[in-house]
Each structure stands twice: as structure tokens, then as C-alpha cells.
């Protein structure tokens, strides 16, 4: 209890990560194992036997809920996808600002903007050696031979032009020629160094010491006028550097040079194993500061503690800063943050016990080290917030906010009729009880229709029996439009740890596992959300909902009128890490479309649920009803939830053909999978077009796909192969299914699609020839897709293959619900009008 205040300050501190690098795509050639070690080649094979490797791997496995093995973690990464793991890692890390040295060349690295959804603030650190190399690679403006004067002029101009856009410079002189930098290198020596560099050929890699020293000194001369600091790699790294030359004591000539007296310098990586030397330099030179990323978390626990203690032996607390030195993989950021908190707490606690600090002084030091010092040093315009961690469920991706910030938690599920439902519990009870034990829910909830809050007769589900809604903490978010609350998606369990066979999310997992186990494939999905925006009007003393406008397709005025609200929605989706690819006004009066980025199918379904919640809630706050109902007005265009699908293996899109030799631009497995979907499409529609109103939308000549066929970029075909911008001509990256609407439960719809695709793969089905005309012009030659829910239900009843994948009991329940829907809406022709309040 003595150090409770210090522990709380450390755990709640929001971090400013002042030195890191770009994250790479999930299919990058960068080996994940390299996240754990600076070793390379044969030496890397021994890395798993180091203390830090074992500890860090275990930490990541605990975060992801996998077994503690490299293979299990890598499997999880591929399945979850980069967006999901990045979101989880940054949330768990509690990083509020990130300064990225983007000069580290990594395969398929993301640019700085890619990182912005995960961290409130992202800034750039410019690596001077890479900056100079790019200038030389571009060549002289007039094509002449480089001279030192010409290089200096262009280097100076370009550096000054970006000075206002960066937060500091970075040098890796330690890697190239060592830290014994000569700040007075002669022009002759520099000119010779330039010639030596150019003689080595392109791409340019600067290793000549004289030229590096010249670039370093020139950079300092420039940035002193912009009040920008210089980060310097010191101490250990990979074997490219000579550790003997990475001792910061070699920098004495630079530090003593009066020209650079006002140039602030940061010694990176705790200068390990020269931490004491770095501490000394920081204490006697006013312009020298320290950063301890890389040493934490790459050393053993005692190694990290001793290194930070050595830094603080002499260094002023106001000159020590945190960073992760995260790179390539989101996990490196999480590990750096997690162990920085542990180590800083341990070091400051011991300093209090030894009498060096009082507890209030230690609390202040923690806040300075984690954020305050860097904010002031780099002139970052943010206010650090408190961060809270959650340890109630170590085997899940726990992302929570303080109970003081959120008072209620919405536990959300989607029933078999596609309706979003929730139970709301106080945050305190959620953390203490619900996380572990779930929320009680009657069996009947998976037997309800879109019209009646009671189980349909032939579902075999009644009010007898209870399940548990177990929150999936990886989906837990603060609600952007209601900051006092959080929301989380739930799985259905008979008891904690035992999945209920009626659970839609579990059904998708089961089918996805078969696809992975049998074919080593993962299905990605991206949804297009079409919805109407309606306003309430009183007509003859009766409330009616009418469209907010009467504009046409892609109308600029329609977008402009709604843009302020759409900006709110996009900001909210961004905070939920849901990528939006584009949006526009659709053809219906008051109709809009918002296309979401593709993800692994289970994540795409999660995102679709949250996107619908976001759109409806924010529009509601502006007095507008957003509805995803398939056919809001029978005399206007319908709304779909078209889904784009692709197949992935080891991070590569394998739906797409490897080259242009493929007949249809897709791979063999892609064609087999798509052929299976086409063959089973009438049965799939019992899942993806689940109410009678769905079939009012699926009509000829409405771009909804009314005939059983497929086409290449044919928007009248229910299945359409797609070649979006950036894909080579002749290749297709995905295919679209139009027979999917906003009343569908996305987990069940995707499960049925994946099941059909697996059947196509097993049977090695082939597609018929594509239709390149309007299918309605081929009446009599093409089979009509189901014209009613009754027809698709009958197709599903006869389809034992899809039933086997979905599960017998869940299939029976779905059939019972669909039959009840048919009966209810056939008895009341105007009942569909109430659907705008349910979808």
C-alpha cells in the first residue's frame, strides 16, 4: 500500500513514444521472429533460448489468448489481421503520441498516415543518412555529375523545406562509421567521401566516414535555426554496427563544438551497455538527453532494471524519456510500453526505499519520463490523458477505460433475424462479474423474428433454458457518441467456456476453421452499406417518415447537405478502427452508401455491426432515422449490404490469379470457391436475404442481381468479379455478392457463403461462362433466383450440405424463423413499414 500512488501514476500514464519505426503489412517479408531479437542469420536460431524472448513471447500469447509458442502467435496474427492486432496492441500499450523514424527500410512498410487510427498523434523523425541517399539516388537536376557544392545546396534546401513538418532528426552514424564524428571534416575529405559513395553504385548507401561526418555536421548547423533535436543511435543494435564505436563518449568533439552548443541531442537505446557513460554525459552537458527504448524490452528483467538505474545514477530526471523503439510489428510497441511501466515503477520504488526520492517526487518523475519531458522537448501539441489497464481477463485482448470514464457497458448480440440487441450493465459489475461469468439470456432470444419478440413455433427454442452472453473483450470500445458508455460484442455460451451451437459468431468460426484446416485459406470480406435517411413529418395528425432529400445518384448537393453529420460518423468509425473506403449519395431519395475496408471475415462482421450502430445512433442524435431495410419504399430503389470476398493464404490474396494467363483473372482455388457460392446461392439467400421485404429489392434491372449467373464487372449479375484501382488489368482481386442486405445476420450470412465455397473447393467446381449482358435480356436462358423468401427457404430445406456446415439445430431454428416471417408478412401487407425501426 505504501507505493500505491506511484503504481497508479505509472499504470495510468498515457505514453509519448518518442522513437519508433513504421509497421509493415501482414504479408511483409519481415520475419515476425525478428521482433524479439537483434540477431540475424544463424544466430537468430538461438534467440528463442534467451530470457527476453521467452518472456516477451509469453506476454504476447497472454494478450492474444493463445498458447505460448511462436507458431500459435503467428497463426493468431494471420487470422486476426493487422488492423485488429494493431488496435489491440496500441490500446493495451496506452500510447497517445508516436514519433516515427521512417528511414528504416522495411518490406511493405506502411506510411505514417496508416498509424493515425491507432494513436491520437503521429509525427515524423527524419533520418539524415537516408535523406541524403535519396537525394543522390534522384540525381542532379540537370543530369550532371555530383559535386559537393551541388549536393550541399540541394541537401540544405530540402532539409529546410521539411523542417516545419518534422519533430527532429535521427542519425545512424554508429551503424555506418561510428560515433567518433569529426565536426571539422575538410571539404576535400568530404568531396572524396562523396566520390567514394557514388563509385559504389546505386541504390546509394553512404558508409564513408568523412561524408557521414560532413552530413551530420551540416544537419546540426541547419536544425539549430529551427530548434529541432537530433536523435543519435548509441549502444547495441544488430551486427551491422561495431559496438566499440557506438559508445557515446566518442561524441565529445561534437558536444564540445561551440557551433552546436544549442543543438539538443538525444542518446537513444539507453546507450546499452554504455548506460553509465550516457548518464555521465547527460549530467555534464546541458544539451544531452536520454531515451531508453530498445533496452526495454530487449534485455532480461534484471538487465532492464539495472540499465535504467544506471541511467538515473547521474542523469537529471527531466532529461530522461520513454520510447518503445517499436518497429515492423505492433507487438513491439506493446512490449516496450508494458515493460517500461514495470521497470520504471521498480526503479522509482527502489529510489524511494533508498531515500533518493519521496513518493510525490517519484510520481512526478514517472509522469515526466513517460510523457512530460518528451512533450516539452519535441514541442508536441497534445495533452496526455490517463491510461488504465485491465487485468481481469489475461487470456483475452482486454481494452478498457477507467470506470470513472465509462459508467455503463452495452453487451451486444445479433439474433437469427439479424436484429441488434443489447443488455446494459454498470461498468463495475461488468468488470467484476460479467467479464468472467457473462450475462444470462433465455434460449428464446435466438428464435425471435423481425416482427415478434417471442420464439417462432418451429425453432425448437422456448423460454425454458438459459445461456450466457460472454463478452469478447477484443471488441470492447468506448462509444464515440456516448463517452460515458462502452460497447462490446458477445459470444453465446451454455456456460463460460462452452460455446452454444446456436451462436452466430461461433457458426462462422466453425466454418472458417474448416476452410483453414482443409485448404489453408482465410476468407476476407468487405461490406458496402446502403441506407436511407428519413425525417419525421406529421401528415393529417399522423407521423410519417419521408426521405431527407429527392436527389439522384452521387449527387453533390445530397452529400453536401449531410456532410457535417457524415464527418461525425467517419470520426466515430475511425475511433473504432473501422476503415471507410468511400461514401456517396445513392440512387434512392435520401439514400447513401458507405463502403468499408476488407478484413478477415469475422472482423468484417464485427465492423459491420459497429458501423450500423454508429450510423443509426449519430443520425438519431440529429433527428434523422437511418434505416438499412432492403426496400423502404416499394416504388424506389432498394438498399443492399453487398459483400466483397477474397481468399488469403499466408498473407497473400490467392483469389487473384498469379499472372495474366488465367482465363477469368482468378486463381484455380478462387474459381472453385466462387463456383460453390454460385451453385448454392439460392440456399444462401435464406441467410443473406432473410425477410420477405428482401425480395422486393431483388428485381431485374435494379443492380441487385435477380438471375443465377455471374459476370465480370456486370452490376446486374448477383456475383460480380471486381478489378478495383491498383489491380493489374486482366486480374480480379475479389468477387461481390449482391444478394446480401441489411436485415441479414452477417455472421450467419458469411458462414453460409464460406460453407458453399468449401463445397466448391472439395468438388473442384468450375464456373460457367460469364454473362456480359443484362441478364433480363436473356429471359428463358437463365434461371431466376428465388423471387420470395418461401423459395429460398425451400432451397435451404433441400440443401443438406449447407445445413451440415451450419449445424442441424441452428438450421432448424433458422427455418422456423423464416417460416414465421413468411406467415406474418403475408397476413399484413403493410407490416414491412415497421422494419425501418428495427434495421
Image (spheres, helix red, strand yellow):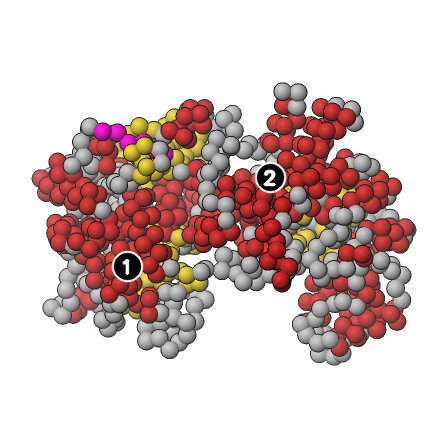
Is 581 in front, or is 636?
581
* Label of residue 60 in the image: none
Quarter holding the N terminus is: top right
Asked whether disc 1 touches disc 2, contact meaning CB atoms under 8 Å apart, the reply is no
* Label of residue 338 in the image: 2
Sooner in the amino-acid sequence: mark 1 or mark 2: 2
Residue 239 percent location from the top left of the image: 71, 60
Is 668 in front, or is 69?
69
Residue in the image at 62% along x and 33% along y: 13
Q: CA distance from mark 1 to mark 2?
A: 41 Å
Residue 591 percent location from the top left of the image: 31, 49
User: Residue 585: in sight, yes or no?
Assistant: no
Magenta span includes 663:
no
Magenta span includes 466:
yes
Residue 594 percent location from the top left of the image: 38, 51
For disc 1, the marked residue is 758
Residue in the image at 25% along x and 40% along y: 502
List the single residue furthest toward the left: 827
Element type at marker 1? helix
Callout 2 environment at 10 Å: few (<14), some (14 to 19), or many (20+)? many
Q: Which residues are magenta?
A: 465-470
Above or below, 486 against 133 in this view is above
Is 147 in front, or is 650?
650
Amino acid at each position: 500500500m505504501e507505493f500505491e500512488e506511484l503504481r497508479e501514476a505509472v499504470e495510468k500514464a498515457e505514453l509519448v513514444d518518442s522513437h519508433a519505426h513504421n509497421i509493415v503489412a501482414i504479408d511483409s517479408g519481415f520475419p515476425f521472429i525478428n521482433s524479439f531479437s537483434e540477431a540475424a542469420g544463424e544466430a537468430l536460431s538461438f534467440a528463442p533460448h534467451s530470457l527476453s524472448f521467452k518472456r516477451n513471447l509469453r506476454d504476447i500469447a497472454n494478450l492474444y489468448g493463445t498458447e505460448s509458442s511462436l507458431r500459435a502467435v503467428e497463426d493468431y496474427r494471420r487470422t486476426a489481421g493487422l488492423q485488429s492486432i494493431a488496435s489491440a496492441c496500441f490500446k493495451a500499450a496506452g500510447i497517445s503520441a508516436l514519433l516515427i523514424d521512417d528511414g528504416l527500410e522495411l518490406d511493405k512498410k506502411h506510411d505514417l498516415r496508416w498509424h493515425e487510427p491507432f494513436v491520437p498523434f503521429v509525427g515524423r523523425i527524419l533520418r539524415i543518412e537516408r535523406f541524403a541517399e535519396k537525394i543522390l539516388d534522384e540525381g542532379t537536376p540537370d543530369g550532371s555529375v555530383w559535386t559537393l557544392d551541388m549536393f550541399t545546396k540541394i541537401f540544405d534546401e530540402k532539409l529546410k523545406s521539411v523542417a516545419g513538418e518534422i519533430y527532429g532528426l535521427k542519425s545512424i552514424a554508429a551503424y555506418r562509421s561510428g560515433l567518433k564524428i569529426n565536426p571539422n571534416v575538410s571539404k576535400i575529405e568530404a568531396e572524396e567521401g562523396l566520390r567514394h559513395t557514388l563509385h559504389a553504385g546505386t541504390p546509394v548507401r553512404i558508409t564513408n566516414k568523412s561524408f557521414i561526418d560532413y552530413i551530420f555536421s551540416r544537419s546540426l548547423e541547419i536544425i539549430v535555426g529551427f530548434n529541432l533535436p537530433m536523435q543519435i543511435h548509441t549502444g547495441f543494435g544488430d551486427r551491422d554496427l561495431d559496438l566499440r564505436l557506438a559508445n557515446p563518449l566518442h561524441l565529445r568533439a561534437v558536444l564540445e563544438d561551440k557551433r552546436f552548443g544549442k543543438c539538443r541531442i538525444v542518446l537513444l537505446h539507453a546507450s546499452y551497455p554504455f548506460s553509465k557513460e550516457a548518464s555521465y554525459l547527460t549530467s555534464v552537458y546541458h544539451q544531452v538527453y536520454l531515451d531508453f527504448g530498445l533496452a526495454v524490452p530487449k534485455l532480461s528483467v534484471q538487465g532492464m532494471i539495472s540499465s535504467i538505474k544506471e541511467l538515473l545514477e547521474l542523469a537529471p530526471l527531466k532529461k530522461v524519456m520513454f520510447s518503445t523503439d517499436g518497429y515492423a510489428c505492433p507487438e513491439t510497441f506493446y512490449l516496450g510500453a508494458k515493460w517500461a511501466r514495470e521497470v520504471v515503477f521498480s526503479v522509482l520504488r527502489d529510489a524511494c526505499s533508498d531515500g533518493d526520492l519521496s513518493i510525490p517526487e517519484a510520481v512526478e518523475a514517472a509522469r515526466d519520463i513517460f510523457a512530460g519531458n518528451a512533450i516539452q522537448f519535441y514541442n508536441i501539441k497534445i495533452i496526455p490523458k490517463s491510461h488504465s489497464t485491465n487485468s481481469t481477463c489475461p487470456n483475452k485482448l482486454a481494452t478498457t477505460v477507467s470506470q470513472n470514464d465509462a459508467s455503463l457497458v452495452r453487451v451486444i448480440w445479433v439474433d437469427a433475424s439479424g436484429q441488434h440487441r443489447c443488455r446494459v450493465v454498470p461498468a463495475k459489475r461488468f468488470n467484476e462479474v460479467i467479464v468472467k461469468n457473462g450475462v444470462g439470456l433465455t434460449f428464446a432470444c435466438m428464435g425471435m423474428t423481425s416482427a415478434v419478440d417471442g420464439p417462432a413455433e418451429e425453432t425448437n427454442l422456448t423460454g425454458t433454458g438459459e445461456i450466457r452472453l460472454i463478452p469478447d473483450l477484443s471488441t470492447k470500445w468506448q462509444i464515440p457518441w456516448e463517452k460515458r458508455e462502452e460497447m462490446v460484442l458477445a459470444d453465446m455460451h451454455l456456460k463460460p467456456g462452452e460455446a452454444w451451437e446456436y451462436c452466430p459468431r461461433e457458426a462462422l468460426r466453425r466454418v472458417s476453421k474448416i476452410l483453414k484446416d482443409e485448404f489453408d485459406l482465410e476468407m476476407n470480406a468487405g461490406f458496402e452499406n446502403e441506407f436511407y435517411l428519413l425525417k419525421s413529418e406529421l401528415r393529417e395528425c399522423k407521423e410519417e417518415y419521408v426521405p431527407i432529400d429527392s436527389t439522384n445518384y452521387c449527387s453533390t448537393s445530397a452529400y453536401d447537405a449531410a456532410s457535417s453529420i457524415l464527418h461525425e460518423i467517419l470520426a466515430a468509425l475511425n475511433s473504432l478502427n473501422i476503415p471507410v473506403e468511400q461514401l456517396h449519395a445513392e440512387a434512392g431519395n435520401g439514400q447513401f452508401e458507405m463502403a468499408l475496408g476488407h478484413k478477415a471475415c469475422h472482423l468484417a462482421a464485427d465492423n459491420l455491426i459497429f458501423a450500423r450502430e454508429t450510423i443509426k445512433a449519430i443520425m438519431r442524435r440529429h433527428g434523422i432515422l437511418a434505416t438499412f431495410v432492403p426496400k423502404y419504399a416499394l416504388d424506389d430503389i432498394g438498399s443492399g449490404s453487398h459483400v466483397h470476398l477474397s481468399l488469403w493464404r499466408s498473407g497473400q490474396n490467392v483469389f487473384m490469379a498469379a499472372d495474366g494467363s488465367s482465363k477469368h483473372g482468378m486463381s484455380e482455388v478462387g474459381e472453385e470457391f466462387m463456383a460453390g457460392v454460385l451453385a448454392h446461392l439460392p440456399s444462401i439467400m435464406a441467410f443473406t436475404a432473410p425477410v420477405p421485404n428482401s425480395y422486393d429489392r431483388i428485381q431485374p434491372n435494379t443492380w441487385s442481381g435477380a438471375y443465377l449467373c455471374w459476370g465480370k464487372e456486370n452490376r446486374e449479375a448477383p456475383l460480380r468479379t471486381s478489378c478495383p484501382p491498383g489491380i493489374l488489368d486482366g486480374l480480379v482481386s475479389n468477387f461481390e455478392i449482391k444478394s446480401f442486405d441489411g436485415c441479414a445476420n452477417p455472421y450467419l450470412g458469411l458462414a453460409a457463403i464460406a460453407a458453399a465455397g468449401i463445397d466448391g473447393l472439395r468438388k473442384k467446381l468450375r464456373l460457367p461462362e460469364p454473362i456480359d449482358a443484362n441478364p433480363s435480356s436473356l429471359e428463358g436462358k437463365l434461371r431466376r433466383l428465388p423471387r420470395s423468401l418461401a423459395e429460398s427457404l425451400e432451397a435451404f430445406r433441400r440443401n443438406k450440405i449447407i445445413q451440415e456446415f451450419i449445424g442441424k439445430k441452428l438450421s432448424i431454428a433458422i427455418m422456423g424463423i423464416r417460416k414465421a416471417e413468411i406467415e406474418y408478412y403475408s397476413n399484413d401487407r403493410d407490416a414491412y413499414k415497421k422494419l425501418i425501426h428495427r434495421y
